Amino acid sequence: MSVEYGLVSDDYTVMSDYRRDASFPARPGVPGGNGEAAPLLMQAAGSTTTFTQIEHVAIQTPATAQPSLVVIDGHAVDSHRYEFPGWVPPSELTFETLDPIDKTTLHHPSRGTLNELYATAICGNDLTSSVLYTIGITTTMAGQLAPLSLILVGFVLYLFKSVYGEAGTAIPLNGGAYNLLLNTTSKSVASLAAVLTILSYVATAVVSATECMSYMANLCPWIDIYWGTIILLFFFCVLSILGITESAVVAVGIFIVHLGSMVFLIFVGFVFTMQNTSTFEANLRMPLKYDWPLSLLFGFCTAMLGVTGFETSSNYIEEQQRGVFPKTLFNSWALVFVLNPLLSLVCMGVLDLTTIEAHHRDVLAKTAYDAGGKYFGLWISADASLVLAGSVLTAFVGVTGLVRRLALDRCLPQILLAENRFRRTNHLIPISFFLLCTVLYVALGGRVRSLSNVYTLSFLCVMALFAIGNMMLKYKRGRIRRPVRASWPTNFAALTAVLIALIGNIILAPGHLIYFIVYFGLVAGITIIMFERIRLMKYFLYLVSQGPVHLQDRFAGVTQMAMDKIRSQKVVFFAKNDNLEVLNKAVSYVQSNELTKWLKVVYVYEDLNDPMIKAIAENLRVIDRCFPKVVIDLVLVQGTFCPEVVAQVSSRLGVPRNFMFIACPGDRFPHDIGDFGGIRMITH
């Protein structure tokens, strides 16, 4: 058995298969051969970060190994041919100095570009637009108890303010519930939250665009709602391609105009009510549809729609300046807690309950018309169109951050990460989202009622998963520093409230569940295919191997190359010490959650004589025998574990930082998890 050591992280650029063949020549200057070396990084003067690695070794397939089910041209496919050799004396390794990293390139250019106003405006437009239809349907269910139902929702959102705040400050990365569950559970569970969130954004964009055009058609009858909806979606697609800063400027303008309009409507409505108290008094005497506890409960369930958009801020948390995210949550909660109950009272003071139910889709415009006259009613209608358009923008901004993270994690095709050279934005994401929304809108013939039902259930499911994810964060990642903490009673109360709202909405409209399952299945199917593409290729390869020779010649090689390319993605685990249990958990996680067969364990040391180096190497040799389908290397980096060193290792190995894993750091860890550019926690 020949043993080869050296620097092999660039091998895939000169080989069709990342797995090293025994006959492949080694690099010059290292034991085992005289082959031509792949290009190394330039030596960087003054840098203290050095790099070397102990690579896997090609071996003969053991006679006791389980035979492969797939045989192409007489050779077994996917057989284990490599092992980790264990500790190697430093004298037999080649060291190099890594290039220093420009700190301005550590993160995406959009990171930290949004201040408090911009960040609040983006999610605030979605949040405050929901009041346009929430008050009407809440009053339909709760009658004169509608303001109390809306206040209850405000208290629930106060609980979620702490829940979202703890999760977002502990792991300040884009992705919302997906990112939270990814760092606390498995990738498959996290993808469930991602699918629900994408579904929520699709429904938000299509429904809000349609409602916006409906309001505009009331103002300008010549507007075609069908084509106007598609044009509006296209406009915000282009705006998203220009970048989040430009989108935020538009969002701020919409947000300020809408808040001013709502405040003025409250003022006019209270003046009208003080002068005409008979309507409000008559509404208080109206009989309830149900007993008062049920009326309050059903009102609460429907009023939870008034907080849709609150979860959006966590999907672009990286673009917010440091410390802004908790302020955004507080501002969002304050808007809901103050505006929604006051607007409900104003509507009850101007309109009788029967009229509110009849105009539940445009109740604020009707209130403005009766309290302030025709032109004030037209103004509120125009404002409704504007803020609903802002809600469409919020959907584009939120889905861009989420899909970008999913593509980085290979849950969605990585072609979506393509950047244009003019704005350095991922233009294919908003374009794909626009096409998805447009195709769905056209397929529905412009009738989006079923999507409205999907929106309700998907939003509540995302809220529930976030509460569950934060509980897992407290249990599994309790040592991470975070400025905001939600107590266990707060988490349980928040989860209980949103589950009650979810069950209540299903009871009120059980037929909506069918629509939800259909749309969820369509979106989830894409993600499942991405997760299981290796398994599907294996099934296909097996079928081909059982068929005629001409089919094997045509498809077998192409399929095998595609599988090898997918699995050639290296992943990295930064080991803190030689803890065998932690190393075992890391390899188990990689095997279960990542489409790869190549793991590089990195140990950052200060002294080459550190006894931990030999201990880690020997433990990895044991683990390598326990996981014969995983190829393991040990990378030794002399330096200090920090974001810059992680970026250097990422550059040298060609491994994106979202494919780098660490064990959960302690509360004395000097760095913020978000500073590492997407590094993931996978063990206690």
Image (cartoon, rainbow, N blue to C red):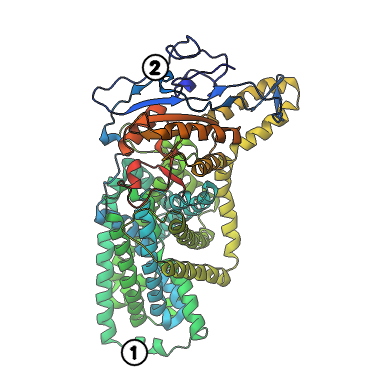
Q: SS at mark 2?
A: loop
Precedes in sequence: disc 2 or disc 1? 2
Q: SS at mark 1?
A: helix
Q: Is residue 308 visible?
A: yes
Alpha carbon distance from label 2 to label 1? 85 Å
Where is 128 relative to 38, above or below?
Answer: below
Within 10 angstroms of label 2, few (less than 14), some, or many (20 or more) residues? few
State the image coordinates of residue 149 (x, y, percent, origin top left). Answer: 42, 77
Looking at the image, residue 223 sits to the left or right of residue 437; the answer is: left
The residue that mark 2 highlights is 39
Where is 22 relative to 404, above or below?
Answer: above
User: Residue at the spot x=46%, y=39% of the render?
Assistant: 578
Marks 2 and 1: CB-CB under 8 Å?
A: no
Three-letter amino acid code at the position of disc 1: Ser
Q: Which mark is residue 430?
A: none
Three-letter amino acid code at the position of disc 2: Pro
Which corner quadrant holds the N terminus? top right
Q: Which mark is residue 278?
A: 1
Nearer to us in this view, 144 or 15: 15
Nearer to us in this view, 283 or 328: 328
State the image coordinates of residue 618 (x, y, percent, origin top left). Answer: 51, 32
Q: Is residue 418 visible?
A: no
Q: Quadrant of residue 538?
A: top right
Q: Quadrant of residue 281?
A: bottom left
Residue located farthest toward the top when viewing the structure as drawn:
34
State the image coordinates of residue 90 (x, y, percent, origin top left). Answer: 41, 23
User: Residue at the spot x=30%, y=42% of the render?
Assistant: 110
